[in-house]
Amino acid sequence: MNKHVKITPEIVAEHGLTAEEYERVKRALGREPNITELGIFSVMWSEHCSYKSSRVWLKKLPTKAPWVIQGPGENAGVIDIGDGLAAIFKMESHNHPSFIEPYQGAATGVGGILRDVFTMGARPIANLNALRFGSPDHPKTRHLVSGVVAGIGGYGNCVGVPTIAGECTFHASYNGNILVNAMTVGLAPTDKIFYSAAAGVGNPVVYVGSKTGRDGIHGATMASAEFSDDSEEKRPTVQVGDPFTEKLLIEACLELMASDAIVAIQDMGAAGLTSSSVEMASKGGVGIELVLDHVPQRETHMTAYEMMLSESQERMLMVLKPGSEAKAEAIFKKWDLDFAVIGRITDSGHLVLRHQGAVVADIPLGPLADDAPVYERPWEPTPPPAEVRAADMPAPASLGAALTTLLGTPDLCSKRWIWEQYDHMVMGDTVIRPGGDAALVRVHGTKKGLAVTTDCTPRYCEADPRAGGAQAVAETWRNITATGATPLAITDCMNFGNPQRPRIMGQFAACIEGMAEACRALDYPVVSGNVSLYNETNGKGVQPTPAIGGVGLLADIDKRATIDLKDDGHVLALVGETQGHLGASLYLREIAGREEGAPPSVDLTAERRNGDFVRQAILQGKIKACHDVADGGVLVAVAEMALAGKRGATLKAAPAGIPAHAYFFGEDQARYVLEIAPADLPALEASATAAGVPFAVIGESGGQALTIGSEPPISLGELRHTHESWLPSYMGAA
Amino acid sequence: MRSAVVVFPASNCDRDMMVALEKLTGRPPLKVWHGDANFPEVDLIALPGGFSFGDYLRAGAMAARSPVMREVIARAKKGVAVMGICNGFQVLTEAGLLPGALMRNAALKFVCRDVHLKVEESQSAFTNRYAQGQVIRIPVAHHDGNYFADADTLDRLENEGQVVFRYCDEAGNASMDANPNGSQRNIAGILNERGNVLGMMPHPERLIEPALGGSDGRGFFESLVEALH
């Protein structure tokens, strides 16, 4: 890109800026920008970096609690987990690149979120993900599943961070725009957390990691636009990951962080050198001057424009204390990483770039960051869906047949094919492996564990975004509770369509309101997050998908509960009220072939009361196995417990007054299935009654089949076969 | 027992190995950087799992040419016990300390799961606390664990008692279904002729306590203490 390019309206439009925004650029500068400056404004004001459409709504989310050390606004959120340790975590999307180039898109998504976490001084201890693919019948789906899973594994396995939990579902709305959300959880001492605000006029600005190439230029802009049929042409904007370098970067950064050399540090993610330098300087209220000739470069003749917009991976920017350059450089040289002093902190309040002896950009920081455009986009509410009455819904040929079908559907089938491609045991602290409600990773060298999960039910969010938003938060809370851990905080990844369409903006707004309500009711604040808009292809948006990543704390991992049935002759009890809600359920979609109805209502008071009861019972050692009830209802929950424990169960017939299929497959919220030794039953029943928690004995564990009332037994072997075979045979047919 | 764990760039099971060695031998191991060819005398050298040098070129190929490996080879030839787990096994074959090669898994995918292993040789320094023919459960986590050697080499390994672990089902049958990666003759771990160098793809250091899902890996470390104390 020649620096003497004349800025035309076409060039402005190619940079994703509106005519109005361009006028604003000129006012900020008091003159016309040059091409480098235009590029910098373009990425900083992109939806991806500026949150210009979402910012007014994000403010509604509760972000505080006594255990929150750092809420949204830093590289990741930080919570106190006691004994001088903090959990640091965030989830982020890499949707657009993963659709174009699934392996590298997903791999660099993992790399990026790892950097967000170790940048704050944390050693990453767990990776998670939330994946949405198009219909299994769509010709691209197989290729995308294969590439995304391999990419997540290829990166995470090499850096040696276990990938321990996640979710993966399919729906035609994602045919042209899959969602790849990656989350990392790390651990750091509370007194050794690193932030991004630059300080100290004259302090050196240091670049470490990989060299800068021409890859990924305009990635942030791509992530802020809709797809059309020619998206394949954007392949060159996808970056290529190098997990080997990332692993070295983690070790080198943590080694340097153990000393006292760093003032501020920030990874170079979307919009690379531009966003890292602008954010660090603007947060610190200082200025920054970079000499681009000193930037380590992988290619020759790179222009200022290219260096500032490159999204080459595995790079970090730091401000060091004066005089500590040599010590820092020695560490990075030991790890064979580039190290270069590329600038200084100034008091100018400007970003100034020099290249080949000339000033090539001089921009006041305010307009780039804090004073970037913010839009209150018009929105319209989602019309309330018609209620679906359970009695009007067709009953299945038999409950057993419906269960077998459901367990073999793409959304409910075992995801073993996926998580066996991830190293989920490296670091030697994985206590609950993938496949249960939440995974549990031990805090190294202690008895404590962090329970972690990702969840969201997009079909609920589409039918009723407010209820769906609340449900997504509540379900992660329930997942964590089911292990015995106390849920502490969430990160969110808001995946929606084009915010310039009022219906989409309405979905976004209502999901936020539902989430905020649930976070408040459950004392479960948002500490970090990411917004991904424009998830549409040819004008059709994805189902609204506010993916939630939850983190909870278990004081003693030996008290944990897992989903597998432990013994024969134990009581199975259902906690929570069952009305038999079939609207927007998987049963309705997969068995009746209908996508309609309102989602189950979310009663946050009941959610909290029931969950607190279950957690307390687990910690008292009275629960042999516990599973929260979600997609597919009670019968699916019991079947999953039976499959995991390799032992069957006998269930009583549905109570009078509720159609059997509604009772067994309804998706009423705030429910758990518990396995209890008979001797513990009376006391638990009494305490449930005292706490006002609905509690019903529904059956007994034992045998090698699942039997419901007077129906013929369903062999576990057959259920297992259906449950385990869908995904491998689908992928094997490639 | 004095032990050392070698750390290559992007080793990632070094900490796990150090934790297991310290816990089960009662003595913290030395951590030896790949560029360091001069490290104190020890009774056991462990090459841990991971992706040394990113698995670029070939898994283990570049690590096998690290300065530290010249010393490891020299000490192995003097009879010092050397073990390579996962990537460490790949390094040992690339360094010529063990015969054969580890190719890409037959299914072409990374695989992380618990597998069953039959202890085929319980007289070694690494396995003396297991019973001959015992079936143990240990996880694998690798992309390139498909053991290959020519038929003569395989016959020789079998005849000389150098096949230490074989993938099998829960009942001990070395079936194809129980083979996670397509290894020839279900071979999971081998010894050199002298019996002081062991390579295996499964990770005994990952299952050493019930909280992690099992303790079958303990016997491996207890054998070393027995043999090298």
Image (cartoon, coloured by chain):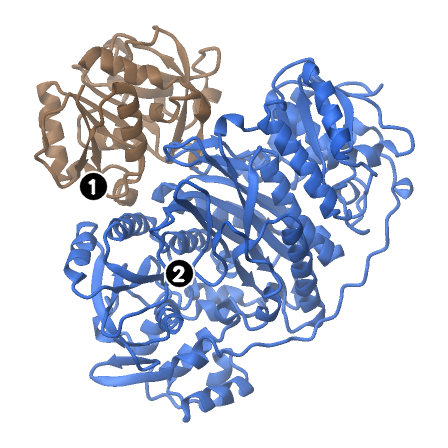
Q: Is residue A218 left or right of residue A407?
A: left
The residue at 41%/82% (across/down) is: A38
The residue at 36%/81% (across/down) is: A36
Q: Nearer the viewer, residue A436 or A477?
A: A477
The residue at 28%/9% (across/down) is: B128
**Residue at the outermost top position:** B132
Picture coordinates of residue B107 (x, y %)? 44, 34
Q: Nearer the viewer, residue A727 or B222?
A: B222
Number of on-image labels: 2
Q: What is the crowding at mark 2: few (fewer than 14 residues within 10 Å), some, or many (at least 20)?
A: many
Quadrant for the N terminus of chain A in the image: bottom left
Instruction: Name chain B's colour.
Output: brown
Picture coordinates of residue A113 (x, y %)? 43, 54
Instruction: Look at the numbered discs 2 and 1 and tell me whether their residues touch, using CB distance below 8 Å.
Output: no
Q: Is residue B67 above or below residue B215?
A: below
**Residue that label 2 marks:** A239
Q: Is residue A430 above or below residue A27?
A: above
Q: Amino acid at mark 2?
A: Gln
Q: CA separation, marks 2 and 1?
A: 26 Å
Q: Which mark is residue B62?
A: 1
Chain hosting mark 2: A
The residue at 35%/44% (across/down) is: A159
Quadrant for the C terminus of chain A in the image: top right
Q: Amino acid at mark 1?
A: Met
Picture coordinates of residue B94 (x, y %)? 21, 33
Instruction: Name chain A's colour.
Output: blue
